[in-house]
Structures are given as C-alpha cells and as structure tokens.
Amino acid sequence: MAEQTNLEEIFRRMCLIRYFELQVAEAVKGNLTPGPVYLSVGQEAISATISTLTKDFAVFTQHRGHSAYLAYGGDIERLIDELLGLRTGCCGGRGGSPCIQDLDIPMYGHHGLIGENIPLATGYSLASSRPTVAYFGDAASEEDYALATFGFAATHKLPILYVCEDNNLSILTPIDARRKWNVYEVTTAMGLKSMAIEDEPRLILETVSGLLDELPAFVNIWTCRHLWHVGIGTDGPPERDRIAEMRDIVPNAEEIEGEIQARVRELWQRQLQKL
Amino acid sequence: MAKTVAETIKEITRRHLNDNNELLFGQAITAVGWVNNTVPNCKNIVEFPMSDVSNMGIVCGAAIAGKRPMIVIRFQDFLWLNNSTLVNYAAKSKDILGTPTPIFVRALAQENAGCVHSGILHSIFMHMPGFRVCSPMTPKEYEEGWDDFMAHDDPMIVSEHRTSFSSTREFSNTDNEADITLMPISAARFNVDAAIEQLNLEGIKCNVAHVMWLKPLKKDHLLGSLANSRAGLVIDATFEICGAAQSIAYELMLETGKPVKAFGLEDRSVGVSYESRNETPSAEKIVAAVKNILC
Ligand SMILES: Cc1ncc(C[n+]2csc(CCOP(=O)(O)OP(=O)(O)O)c2C)c(N)n1
Ligand SMILES: [Mg+2]
C-alpha cells in the first residue's frame, strides 16, 4: 500500500514535469521564450522519484533543471515567468532556463557551466551539514573539477547524494566517443558508495533508499532524453517512455494525467496573459 | 562563388589536418552541425571529454611534441576554465623555458545566448604577454590570421563570432576628411554601415577603419583614417571597461592628441530577458555615442 502511494505520487510528479515541459515547447513555438531552453522530457522519473526520498535536502541542479525544480515543489508561476523573461521570474528573468532556482526548497541556481553545481553543492553540504543532493549529466560528471569533488566528499564523509542523469549524450556526442571508463567505478574507487541503474521508479526507490543510509553516495541512472539537447526538436521516436510504462502500474493513471495536464495548461495560460 | 568565413575555416582546417598531418581538438566537434559547419570530416580530429580544465594542457602537450595543434572552444566563456594552462604555460613557455607552444585557439562567440554562452574574452589575452590575438570577420582576414600563426611560434587566440560565419564580405577602410573615425571590432563591424548611413543623413561624415589585429595591434590604417578626422570611436562587442576598445582608444589618443573614445557593453552581467540583455552596440547606439563625442 505504501509503495502504491509512493508510486502514485511519483507518477504525479512525472506528469507535472512532462506536461510542464510540453507547455514550454508550445511557448518556444510561439517565440515567447527569449533564451535557450533545456527540457527534461523523457528523464522525469529520476528527480520525480528521488525527490520523494530527499524532501529535506538542499538541491543543486545543472542546466536541465526544470525537472528537479518541479519535483521538489518549486514555484511554478515563477518558473514560467523566468522562461518568459519576466522580472517576476525565479531569477528576475535574467538567468533563463539553465540557471533556475527556488530558495524556498532550497534549490540553488548557477551560471551554466556544466558540472559547476557539483563543487557548489559539496561546499554547501560541508558548511551547512544539511543533506544535499546534486543532479547533473553524464558529461558534467567527467569534468575534472567534478571528479576531484567526488573525492573530496569521500574524504570528508559529507552528507551528499550525487545523481548522474545519464542519457549517454553530451549535446549529441555519446559517452563512447568521449571516454572508455565509467564515472561510478571511479567514485567507487574513491570510497563513495556507488550504484548504476535504469530509471525505473521502483528500482530508483529501492536503490536510493539504501544509499541514503550511506552518504556520501553516487548513483548513475541511465535515462532517455526525448528531445534535442536544447530546444524542442526530436530525432525520431524515443527508445522508451517511463510515463507510458507507469500507466500500467498506477491505478487511475489516465485521470491523474488529465487532471495535471489541465492544471499545468491553466497555469501557463494565466502567466501568458502577463505578456 | 565566393567562400564564406565558415567555409574558409573548414578549408584551412582540412589542409592542416590532411596535408600537414596535424591535430584538431575539441568537445562535441564532430556532431551537431560540426561547429556551424566549420569542422571538416577528416583524420586527426580528437574528441575531448568534457574535462574543460585539463583539455588545454593536453593541447599544449601536443605542441611541446612539435605539433601546431588547433583547439575549438565552442563558446568563449569556457576559456575561463582552461585559461590557466593557456596563460601560465602556453604564453610563457617560450620566454621562460625556451620551448614555444604554437597552438591555434578557435574561440567562438555568439550574441544573446544567455549568461554562459555570450561572452567575448579577447581583451584578457591582450593583457597577458606571449599571445597573438586577432578577431577576423572575413574570409581573407581569416587566411591572414592563419598565415600569421604558421609564420610564428606563439599561441594564437582567434576571437571568432558566429555572426560572421555565413558572410562572404570583405571590408574596406576610408581616410577622407571626416568628423569621426569609427573603429569597430568583432560583431560590431557588421553594425557600423547602418550607423554611418544614418550619421551621413544627419550631416556627420565618418571614416571607418576596421580592427582585425588586436595584438600586436596593427594601427597604421587606424592612424591614417584618424589623421583626417576630428575624433575617433573604437567599438567592441565585449565589455567596454578595461577592454580592448579602451586600450586601443587610449593608445590612439596618446599618439594623435585627438579625442578617441571606447564603446562596448555595459559593466553588468549579460542576461537573457530582453531588458537584461547587454548586446554588441547597435547602429542606433553607435549613432548616439558619436553625437555624444562630437557635441
Ligand atoms: C564547462 C562547460 N563546458 C561545456 C559546456 C557546453 N555544454 C552545455 S550542455 C553540454 C552537454 C552536457 O551534457 P550532460 O552533462 O550529460 O547533460 P545533458 O545535457 O545530457 O542533460 C555541454 C557540453 C558548458 N555549458 N560548460
Ligand atoms: Mg548527458
């Protein structure tokens, strides 16, 4: 029963992210977003699931951060305003999609250099002793300063969870063209409890629940980005769709989906009137 | 048909990699449009991991081994990460160790690409001894920059701008009797025509002297145009404060005794929203700046 409740909540968060992102895509089509947007369509399961286990954590994301922002309950109107370049946005309209933050979570934004959030999150957890989670991509995790930071967290036994959203892509370049080694094996050697799993919500729940007892830890989660690196294009149908799979698992999935889709659409319509 | 800047870069790179058996490094350069179609599909291309700090050291190491490697930096802001090796090793190695580090750094800029992708950093390299710095905006200028690189053994910073990539245009300078000489750099060069047209309509005569070489500064043509005008304005696509435009304006002012001002981006972070943008001076802004000097 508890698992069922959890899965329903995860599904709700996944739908919130999915339908939010599809509304962003509409706004991009209408030329309403002044800056580039980085969408999480296809990758929703990761932060939707982990956020249910880490709700008191401080959150640091990188450029593809709408998903974590929404999963942790970030202010939706302020996110829409940010993407529309309005002063009422979560960064005053200045940062745009890659820099978003909501200090009430607290989730901290950054400048947009990939992996820059990894040392920032680590310093934050050192100084605050607050459990902290950092989300980043497979490319960010190979940045030299990211690797050095994982070692630092192990040395100082910091209360931090590193989540690598591994879509096997840096823009369009797959891992194999960039390196012949796995980051989670390096972090294991450094002394971080490290796991590598698929982005199936029940598997994430089980794995991350275990890791939270052993922080600092690293989880590499293979996932599937449906849209282009930046913007809203696609290169054909995705290999898999976790939301579609969840429809068979969660009771009343269609109802939930319809309700969330309608709510997101309404929120967007209301904010768009500000333009 | 005339070659574009992008085609010129691609051709130079192909020659270097194929004929000279040289190396090209960069991140994600063989995907996503091959860096705006400036990278040829040929041998000797090394895809880097996203390890921005160490990557430049690897390129410098290749130069120590006797190569003349090229590296693509897709957005100039990333240079902040690998700059340490550039400034502390590449630029000093000839003077201190007697080992030159001839690397060709293709640093791309873009307008309005948000706070992490809009930067132009050529000024900071002008500040440091040991670099040659240029900002070619035409096919011939790019060839000239390349020939200069091959003729010397210094690290070369090439401050490119995507605005120029589809252009086939060559610019010319003027040295007529004029009220002011406009000296634009980088993307600002594409905005001066419209400014001059407007100023002419208002009875203000302008010379133009384009700035491609930043270090060593090539200034004979700048001085020639300035000699026949009352004042000068150096316009850059990056920050005005402590930047290339101010430095060049100062040098020209000392040499000519004429008022020469600098004009560039405001001293604040570049934002994404329309109101927080901080762009290459537009024709309208150039017109206003000129009137300000002449009034
Ligand atoms: C330090 C730095 N280097 C390069 C870039 C250019 N860049 C932006 S996003 C990106 C790919 C990031 O891939 P990954 O970390 O796997 O995240 P994903 O986009 O796949 O979610 C790159 C190379 C950057 N923003 N910062
Ligand atoms: Mg990736």
Image: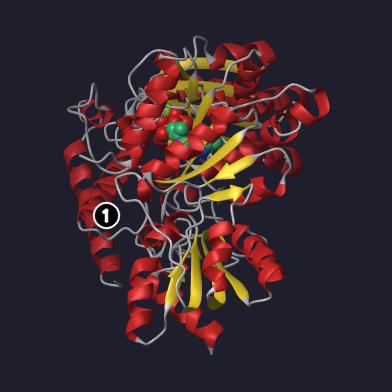
Give the quadrant of residue B12.
top left
Give the residue number, with chain letter if any, for mark 1: A264
- Residue type, numbered disc 1: Val
Q: Nearer the viewer, residue B247 or B53?
A: B247
- Classify mark 1: helix, strand or loop: helix
Q: Is residue A218 above or below residue A50?
A: above
Residue B64, horizontal then vertical, whole percent: 67, 17
Image point 37% across, 42% down: which residue? B139
Q: Nearer the viewer, residue A72 or B189?
A: B189
Residue A211, horizontal then vertical, whole percent: 57, 22
Residue at the far right: name it: B96
Q: How would you rate the neighbour count of disc 1 (Cα within 10 Å): few for under 14, some for 14-19, many for 20 or more? A: many
Image point 22% across, 34% down: which residue? A234
Image point 43% across, 66% down: which residue? B174
Quadrant of the drawing holding the N terminus of chain B: top left
Quadrant of the drawing holding the C terminus of chain B: bottom right
**In-image side of B128 versus B202 (left or right):** right
Q: Write down the chain letter for disc 1.
A: A
Q: Is residue A219 above or below residue B133?
A: above
Residue B124, horizontal then vertical, whole percent: 66, 49
